[in-house]
Image (cartoon, helix red, strand yellow):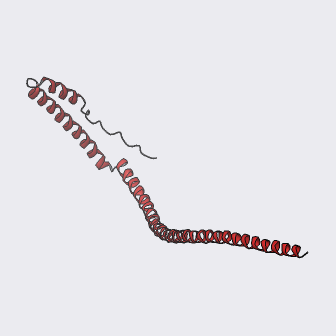
Amino acid sequence: MEILLYVSAAIAALSLLLIAVFVIITLKSAKATMNEVSETLTTMQGKLNGITDQANELLANTNRITEDVERKMQSLDSVSKTAEKLDDSTIHMNKSFKSLSEQISKPDPKYKDLMQKANTVTGIAASIYFRAKREKAKQTNASDFPKQNKRKTERVGLLPSPQKRLPEPKQKN
């Protein structure tokens, strides 16, 4: 029975040795895992610092953009006010043009005759001028440059016809 006692003590010692070996293996594995976790946390902290820096830059850019938009909105307000003033000016100019057109369409009788005579004289003067120009072009270019003469004669044909008399304005009853 003593042998049995020694065998059981040896088995107990062996089992304690095996337990110690497995505990050491487990501790080494846990230490490696802890090192990996530590490295992962360090990497994550670095990335978070980078993200935080980018977020701060983004916030600063957003603030600058907001200020720029506010300045532009203020300038648009001044443009809007200018447009309102331009609208008032346009209304005033339209009234002025309407008044002027009414004055032109209904001239005083003493100016009406003068305007008709001036229109007639202008038409006659234009006709004489273009006729003289045509004759001069024919004389100077007829023998020298046949191709240019043809072009100039075509241009002379495109000249405007003398002005006609303006129709009598309609009078309101």
Residue depicted at 26% across the width and 41% down the height:
119
- In this rendering, the answer to whether 65 lies above or below 110 is below
Residue depicted at 30% across the width and 46% down the height:
112
Count of numbered circles in the view: 0
Whether residue 145 sits left or right of residue 163 in the image: it is left
Q: Residue 92 falls in which quadrant of the image?
A: bottom left
Whether residue 159 sits left or right of residue 89 in the image: it is left
Q: Nearer the viewer, residue 143 or 133?
A: 143
Whether residue 72 sits left or right of residue 114 in the image: it is right
Q: Residue 171 falls in which quadrant of the image?
A: top left
Q: Nearer the viewer, residue 142 or 102?
A: 142
Q: Nearer the viewer, residue 31 or 160?
A: 31
In the image, residue 115 lies at what x, y percent?
28, 45
In the image, residue 48 lies at what x, y percent?
57, 70
In the image, residue 88 lies at what x, y percent?
44, 62
Residue depicted at 41% across the width and 53% down the height:
98
Q: Residue 19 falls in which quadrant of the image?
A: bottom right
Q: Nearer the viewer, residue 70 or 119?
A: 70
Q: Name the image quarter holding the N terminus.
A: bottom right
In the image, residue 121 lies at what x, y percent?
21, 40
Residue most extreme to the front: 2
- In this rendering, the answer to whether 31 lies above or below 144 is below
Whether residue 48 sits left or right of residue 96 in the image: it is right
